[in-house]
Image (cartoon, helix red, strand yellow):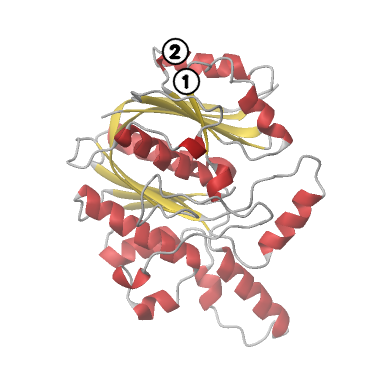
Amino acid sequence: MYYLSLFQKMRGIFINSAVSISAQNTFEGDLFDMELPVESTKTISAIHPNYKEYISPAASRRMATGVKMGVTAAKRALNIAGVDQPDAIITGTGMGCIEDSEKFLNAIIENDEEFLTPTSFIQSTHNTVGAQIALGMKCQAYNMTYVHDSVSFESAVLDAQLWLDENEAKDVLIGGVDELGKQFINEMLLLEENIQGGIAVPFGEGANFFVLSVDKGENCTAKLLSLEIVNRISEKEINQRTYSFLEQNDMVPSDIDAVILGYNGDCFDIYYDSLHEMFKDSAQVQYKFAVGEFYTSSAYAFWLGTQIIRKEEIPQLYLKHNKTKSDIKTILLYNQFKGKQHSFTLITAC
């Protein structure tokens, strides 16, 4: 079988801030301030903060939901880290600004391809979030957006690591953003309903931003140790691939205090179930039931991991098998989508 694997062991990159806008009250609230979505819901929107505190009303009116979420989360992440100008801005997104894409396509149909205004088209590009963040602070540093399906955020992390490891940057702003949109999501839902083992958790949206740095900051929450992306892994290989990833980081399964898994209720959850025995002594955490499934939902898992390490406690509702530890220092994050785009991320206390 052919597969592509990208592995990077890091010297230890400090996560000096972590900010989340999600379907839970993660921006203003607390890790334990969580409400379960209604079981019958098919989509779950983010809980939006007061954008006026971060974006002028005039600018906000022209921004799609994803842009507002991204700009706001990014500004707060930089403030917490005490960084005025990052050395790089790197974002990941699966769908980009789908709301503006829908507006432009609808305008084409309604106006019979005539008298079209370019605004929605210009703002529909996937790199709009990163561009708006840079414009707002007049930042002319490296600015990149990755659109790599469900490993879009992980691709951004790898790029940031290269900048930091090569001493080309000291502070890098990274984030993952996706919005629901209004029409395309209905097509996705229809498609899933016709697929055996379709997603059981709702589709969601969110923006999760972080400042990664060479030096430990005052508000450091955790440290990023390693990350690997593998395009394809068979169900029979998942245990060996996971063990190999840990081995490359001089660890064994018993060194992992908690493992955060991307359960979404479809038939591909068998990958996560396969790891149950390997991590029987670790706390096993799920999260998509609370915030929904979207291409950069793994960025929320990254945020969740930093908060669990900071508090050394896991909310009971997140636990998959009702088992936890009193001292949580090292966490493994594992996610995949439809049996492809597998990602392993290792974080620890800073």
Alpha carbon of mark 1 to alpha carbon of mark 2: how far? 7 Å
Quadrant in which residue 70 is drawn: bottom left
Q: Tell me the crowding category of disc 2: few under 14, some 14 to 19, or many 20 or more residues within 10 angstroms, Cα based.
A: few
Residue 63 in sight from this viewpoint: yes
Q: Amino acid at mark 2?
A: Ser
Residue 227: give x, y in percent of width and height. 44, 29
> In terms of image quadrants, where is residue 130?
bottom left
Disc 1 + disc 2, Cβ < 8 Å: no
Residue 191 appears left or right of 326? right
Q: Is residue 171 above or below residue 95?
A: above
Asked whether, in this view, residue 135 is left or right of residue 295, the answer is: left
Viewer-nearest of discs 1 and 2: 1
**First in residue order: circle 1 vs circle 2:** 2
What residue does disc 2 label?
254
Q: Which residue is mark 1?
A: 282
Q: Amino acid at mark 1?
A: Ser
Camera-nearest residue between 70 and 205: 205
The quarter holding residue 31 reads: top left
